[in-house]
Amino acid sequence: MTAPVPRCFRGFRDVFAGDLLLKQRMIETVRAVYERYGFLPLETPAVEFVDVLGKFLPEAGTPDGGIFSFRNPDLSPTAPDGDPDRWLALRYDLTAPLARVVAQYADLQRPFRRYQIGSVWRYEKPGPGRFREFTQFDFDSVGVPGSAADAEACCIICDVLEALGFGAGDYIINVNDRKILQGVLEVSGLAETDIGAEGSQASTVLRAIDKFDRLGRAGVVQLLGRGRKDETGDFTEGAHLEPSQIEKLEAYLDAKVASRSAVCDRLAGLVGSSPIGAEGVQELRDIDRYLTALGYGSDRVAFDPIVVRGLAYYTGPVFEGVLTKSIVDESGQARQFGSVYGGGRYDTLVERFTGERVPATGASVGVDRLLEAMKLLDGARRTATAQVLVTTMDKERTADYLALAQQLRRAGFATEVYLGKGAIGKQLKYADKLGYRFAVIVGGDEFAQGVAQVKDLQLGKQMADSVGSREEWRKGQPAQVTIPLGGLIDHLRGSLA
RNA sequence: GCAGCCGUAGCUCAGUUGGCUAGAGCGCCUGACUGUGGAUCAGGAGGUCAAGGGUUCGAGUCCCUUCGGCUGUACCA
């Protein structure tokens, strides 16, 4: 038997304190905003039946390739392909399970407004900042027909990003409406084609528009026509539209202007006589009205015809939160973070189960991706969870050190007692590396006098720059004061105030 | 999934047309500077050169395969 090699499966990873503490603090901030709007928490299983997730491929009789799926171990291996219980999968988002919950519990009070955080899994190629297991933090309102809920969702996204330290101008929420997309396809002569149908012209067109950010206008236009060859020589088949059709869609691609109402006017013209298109424009007008009334201007929420949000289940307004602040990474490269929030209205997701049309809207934040951006924004990070390290100079007095730390904790200071080995110098180094604010030193002399040395490590760090010699550094005992043991708590309180 | 590039110490990398015991900086550990972080100084640990196979007198260097990473492309709830 060979020894196992410690390793993680591709696209999976371990997360250590430095990142994890930032993540947890961020989650707290997001949760506070969601609760301020009255959302309630929900938890659902990581594993769902594949047909519930809507990722079952009836033609092949197997689950979609993009998900982690497996056979139901409760079922006999010879269970027929048609058995809906046969396949299980890890959830790939939190919206599909939400739809299941709404369909399953008929007595849920509606509107049902819930927030949910959790890991989701996708079986796809990992990339930088892209993993096969990652965290999403969603909020959704179920049972809300009007555009007010969509406008509110945009406000929530703004509030979250601002609570996390992004200012107006550091981010933008781009909003579009699937009904407008549908209307434009309609007037371009692509109406009868089902968007969802694989290989349909309509779906090819939507995919092309979705690539605007990456390929630019010219690239999209190529994909609307014959197709596009990339720099490696790879060829992507286009939608093969007529020149007149492409012309209409080009006008659509150019419809974005700064003012939301002006975008609506332009889109109204492009959508022409299509009823569904007109409906979409009206939804955007409503959203604009609400946002304007609430003081969310186009510097924070803009209307952008380019937004598609994949071929997903969206039925009306769709939106994405994008970080626009240019962020410079360790190697000095400017990095674009792109979309961190994604969401929209999905009025047919519950209908799949019960036949009842239940309107719903919401959004999802990619926690890990947003965290990456935040790390680069304020590079400074602290790994310590405690503020105070009680050093143990005299191991014989360990009981006294433990008791002292207990006193500090009762007074509200997160405190660690150094229980490793090593002299005082090593202990202070440890405190310094982990980012402790204070070190408390009590040796034989101090015990005799009933005092403690309290060192402010942050202050000392600042002073270190101006100190040249070792003599000076040590003699100066930078940022260190002698405090009677009885006054220790008051001193720490005072220093933190 | 497809295509191209890459894989040498914990990290960033060097390693000449294949040629002695594979190196540096940073980090880490130990110690000195009388019981004190930084700086400085002196030591030390750490590599089956991603893994496996092949060519060769000889492979970190050349060839094949696998795994992993990056870039582009496809898909993306």
Image (tube, coloured by chain):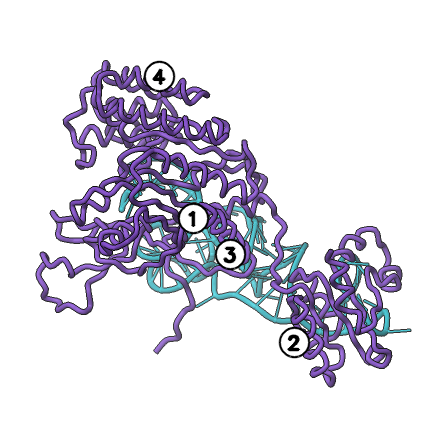
Query: Which mark sits nearer the N-terminus, 1 or 3?
Result: 3
Q: CA distance from mark 3 to mark 4?
A: 44 Å
Residue ID for mark 4 = A266
Q: Position of residue A125 (x, y in %)?
A: 34, 48
Provide the chain ID for the residue under circle 1: A
Between A445 and A200, the residue placed more toward the observer is A445
Marks 2 and 1: CB-CB under 8 Å?
no
Mark 1 crowd level (few <14, some 14–19, many ≥20, 10 Å Cα):
few
Give the mark toward the camera: 1 or 3.
1
Q: Amino acid at mark 2?
A: Gly
x and y percent of residue A248 in the render?
27, 16
Distance Cα–Cα, label 2 vs label 3: 27 Å
Instruction: Give amino acid for label 3.
Output: Gln
| Relative vertical location of residue A54 with respect to residue A149 in this rendering, above or below | below
**Taking A404 as reference, is A298 above or below it?**
above
| Residue position for label 2 | A420
Q: Residues within 10 Å of mark 4 (few under 14, many from 20)?
A: some
